[in-house]
Image (cartoon, rainbow, N blue to C red):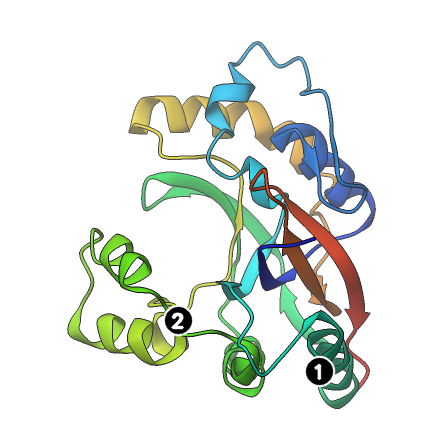
Amino acid sequence: MFERFAIFYTPTGALADFGAAWLGWDSATGRAVPHPDTGLDVATITATPRKYGLHGTLKAPFRLSVESDPANLQMAVADFAKRHAAVAIGHLQMAHHHGFIALRPASDPPALHALARAVVTELDQHRAPLTDADIARRRKAPLTARQDTQMLDWGYPYIFDDFRFHLTLSGPLPDAQGAQVVSTLQPMLAPVIATPWVIDAVTLMGQDADGMFHQIHRYALTG
């Protein structure tokens, strides 16, 4: 059913509802959602991140290795969640950084980096090696030598010391448009992210033939 898999953090509650409407895709139910009426061209602004739904990447999309299968992957993620604890990350802040708008933790807790590292390394046996086309596509971005090595070894360049947790809200935007979108979203998001945040689960995702990501199961971190 799914062509690729990924391990994301996916929020629940009011933030999940906001993200589904804003991006136009609810990954939990696998359906398109009408955009809010904000006076902005939301469909264009969110075109790039829409297929993923609102999420924070922990292990980037990958094809299954020949030694694994969907059932084994599900069991592995369930076991991972039983062995690892939830991580408090403090308050989320919205900003237009690195060309796109995202929610990011105000602080950078070491426990979050440890969790992300564990997801990447402990579940990597289920990932098929990158193809030559995958490598060429990744190298279109300006990678450092370390990022290139990480991409070859682990399937994704922005991990370990290059990992920055974020929930993406837009595609690339120029500064003026980004500032306008942030100004529009701020009053909508402020009450939703008013309290400190906890990464309380990891979600196994599947990408369908149309490129859209679906939540297969959200596993509570109970270790």
Disc 1 marks which amino acid? Answer: Ala
The answer to whether residue 87 is left or right of residue 98 is: right
In the rendered image of this protein, does residue 209 appear above or below residue 12? Answer: above
Front residue (pair 24, 112): 24
- Mark 2 Cα within 10 Å, few/some/many (few <14, many 20+)? many
Q: Which quadrant, please, contains the C terminus?
A: bottom right
Would residue 182 be seen by someone viewing this image from the given angle? yes
Whichever of callouts 2 and 1 sits on the residue coming sooner in the sequence is 1
SS at badge 2:
loop
Q: Where does residue 104 sit, x and y in percent of width and height?
A: 52, 54
Front residue (pair 156, 85): 156
The residue drawn where x is 78% and y is 79% is 78
Disc 2 marks which amino acid? Answer: Gly
The answer to whether residue 61 is left or right of residue 190 is: left
SS at badge 1:
helix
Q: Where does residue 190 sit, x and y in percent of width and height?
A: 67, 38
Res 155 label: 2
The residue drawn where x is 34% and y is 70% is 162
Disc 2 from disc 1: Cα separation: 18 Å
Pointer 1: what residue? 76
Q: Where does residue 45 sit, x and y in percent of width and height?
A: 47, 25
